Image: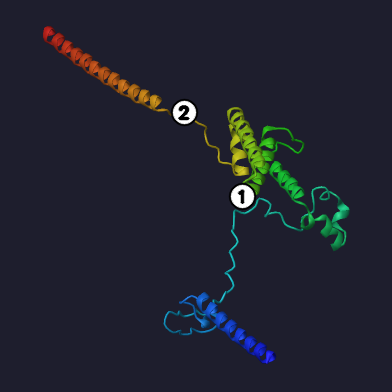
């Protein structure tokens, strides 16, 4: 009898626990959810208070970005088969095999070696003779190659403040050299600007901060100047008219 009562009690407890679990699950589920939300595929309709599941999103490959084409480098005109500056005058380098010649050419040269060769090319355009290495024209050519190298570097690394400062210092130094060369030898100045492709712009006569007081003073001075010029023109007309009247009176007296 005791065993039968124990079995009946266990059955009642199991059934009550199942009912409690079903009620708790039903309460935890929100009224707008739907069992079809777990499905992935086409839209599935639900009953009252449900919603339709959107189809899966297809992620396509992105379009390849176009590379920015900047200005052409000053070193692009140097052929890769040209020998380095240290081996250009060696006759043995001209008759070697292809492997050694490739090692001595600009194909495997560093950027500094190419820049040194470009400087030498610009110097030969403007130097006075073969042994000229310290004239103003040669220094302008070396500074020009250096400035263009800085400009190409800053196009890729625009936050490099140290090289930007060096570039501005080199530009100021070249301006001073060109200004002195223009005053001393104008023909050489024109030749340097033409051969190196430099556009010389005249600096302003003076630098002054344009404040409101200075602008008002300038406008007042211009107004006073115009009034003075107007008074002088009236005085000249008066003198001219008086002179013409005197001449006419003299003619009448003479008659």
What residue appears at the point 22 percent right and 14 percent down from the top-left corner?
Answer: 239
Residue carrying label 2 = 209
Residue 161 placement (x, y as % from top left): 64, 41
Residue 94 appears in the rendering: yes
Q: Which mark is residue 205?
A: none
In x, y percent, where is residue 216? 35, 25
Location of the C terminus by quadrant is: top left
State which quadrant residue 13 falls in.
Answer: bottom right
Give residue 8's position: percent from left, percent from top. 63, 89
The quarter of the picture where the N terminus appears is bottom right
Left or right: 135 in relation to 54: right
Which one is nearer the viewer's eye here, 81 or 241?
81
> What element does badge 1 sit on?
helix
Crowding near the residue tagged with mark 2, few <14, some 14–19, many ≥20 C-alpha atoms within 10 Å: few
Q: 120 or 131, which is in the foreground?
A: 120
Front residue of 34 and 150: 34
The reply to whether residue 39 is visible in this rendering is no
Is label 2 in contact with label 1 (beta carbons under 8 Å)?
no
Q: Is residue 253 above or below residue 86?
A: above
Q: Quadrant of residue 234?
A: top left
Query: If you read the primary sequence from the N terminus, does the residue marked by circle 2 or circle 1 appear first?
Result: 1
Numbered disc 2: secondary structure: loop
Mark 1 = which residue? 155
Q: CA distance from mark 2 to mark 1?
A: 31 Å
Left or right: 119 as drawn, with respect to 35: right
Q: How many numbered markers are drawn?
A: 2
The residue at the point 77 percent across, 36 percent down is 131
Crowdedness near tag 1: few (<14), some (14–19) or many (≥20) residues, C-alpha within 10 Å: few
**Is 219 left or right of 65, judged from the image as shown?**
left
- Figure check: 81 above or below 245: below
Residue at the spot x=61%, y=50% of the render?
155
In this picture, residue 28 sits left or right of residue 1: left
């Amino acid at each position: 009898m005791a065993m039968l009562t124990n079995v009946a009690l266990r059955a009642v407890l199991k059934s009550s626990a199942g009912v409690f679990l079903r009620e708790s699950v039903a309460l935890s589920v929100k009224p707008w959810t739907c069992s079809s939300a777990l499905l992935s595929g086409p839209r599935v309709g639900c009953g009252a208070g449900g919603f339709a599941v959107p189809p899966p999103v297809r992620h396509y490959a992105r379009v390849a970005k176009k590379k920015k084409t900047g200005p052409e480098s000053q070193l692009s005109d140097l052929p890769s088969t040209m020998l380095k500056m240290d081996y250009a005058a060696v006759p043995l380098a001209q008759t070697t095999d292809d492997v050694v010649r490739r090692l001595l050419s600009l194909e495997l040269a560093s950027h500094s070696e190419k820049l040194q060769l470009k400087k030498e090319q610009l110097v030969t355009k403007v130097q006075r003779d073969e042994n000229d290495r310290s004239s103003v024209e040669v220094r302008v050519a070396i500074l020009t190659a250096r400035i263009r190298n800085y400009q190409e570097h800053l196009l890729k690394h625009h936050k490099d403040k140290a090289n930007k400062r060096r570039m501005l210092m080199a530009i100021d130094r070249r301006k001073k050299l060109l200004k002195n060369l223009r005053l001393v030898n104008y023909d050489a100045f024109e030749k340097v600007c033409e051969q190196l492709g430099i556009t010389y712009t005249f600096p302003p006569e003076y630098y002054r901060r344009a404040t409101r007081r200075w602008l008002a003073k300038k406008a007042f001075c211009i107004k006073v100047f115009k009034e003075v010029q107007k008074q002088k023109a009236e005085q000249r007309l008066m003198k001219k008219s008086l002179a013409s009247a005197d001449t006419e009176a003299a003619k009448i007296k003479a008659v």
